[in-house]
Amino acid sequence: MPKISVEIPQELLDDLDDHVGDDGKFVNRSDAVRASIRKTLDILDEIDERHDRLESEE
């Protein structure tokens, strides 16, 4: 799996960390970031579909 690096504001990182760990929804930051990216892409696909902007799979 490729690795990437991103710069994010400390406040956003702190919010992310609130959801990571034994008491959080995610095992680690990577899992949280992957889930966030998937969710964002799903939302963008839904918006594109509503506006007939998705390419057909022909």
Image (cartoon, rainbow, N blue to C red):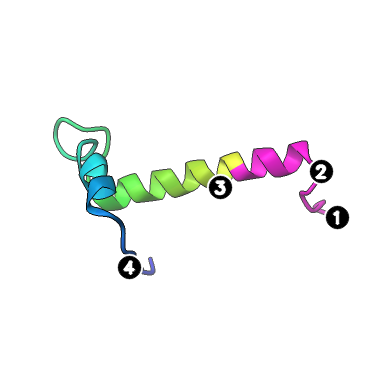
Q: Position of residue 41 (x, y in %)?
A: 56, 47
Q: Nearer the viewer, mark 3 or mark 1?
A: 3
Residue sitting at x 31%, y 63%: 7
Work out how far the residue at label 2 is from the one at label 1, CA to CA, in angstroms: 15 Å
Q: What is the secondary structure assignment of the residue under circle 1? A: loop
Mark closest to the chain's N terminus, 4 or 1: 4
Q: Say whether residue 32 is magenta.
A: no
Q: What is the secondary structure assignment of the residue under circle 3? A: helix
Which image quarter is the C terminus in?
bottom right
Amino acid tagged 3:
Leu
- Residues at marks 4 and 3 touching, judged by CB atoms closer than 8 Å: no
Q: Which residue does the numbered mark 3 point to in the structure image?
A: 41
Q: Say whether residue 46 is magenta.
A: yes
Q: Which residue does the numbered mark 1 point to in the structure image?
A: 58
Q: Nearer the viewer, residue 21 or 1?
A: 21
Q: Which residue does the numbered mark 4 point to in the structure image?
A: 5
Residue sticking out furthest to the right: 58
Residue sitting at x 28%, y 55%: 9
Residue sitting at x 78%, y 48%: 53
Amino acid tagged 2:
Asp
Circle 2 crowding by C-alpha within 10 Å: few under 14, some 14–19, many from 20: few
Work out how far the residue at label 3 is from the one at label 1, CA to CA, in angstroms: 22 Å
Amino acid tagged 1:
Glu
Q: Which residue does the numbered mark 2 point to in the structure image?
A: 52
The magenta span reads 44-58
Work out how far the residue at label 4 is from the one at label 3, CA to CA, in angstroms: 19 Å
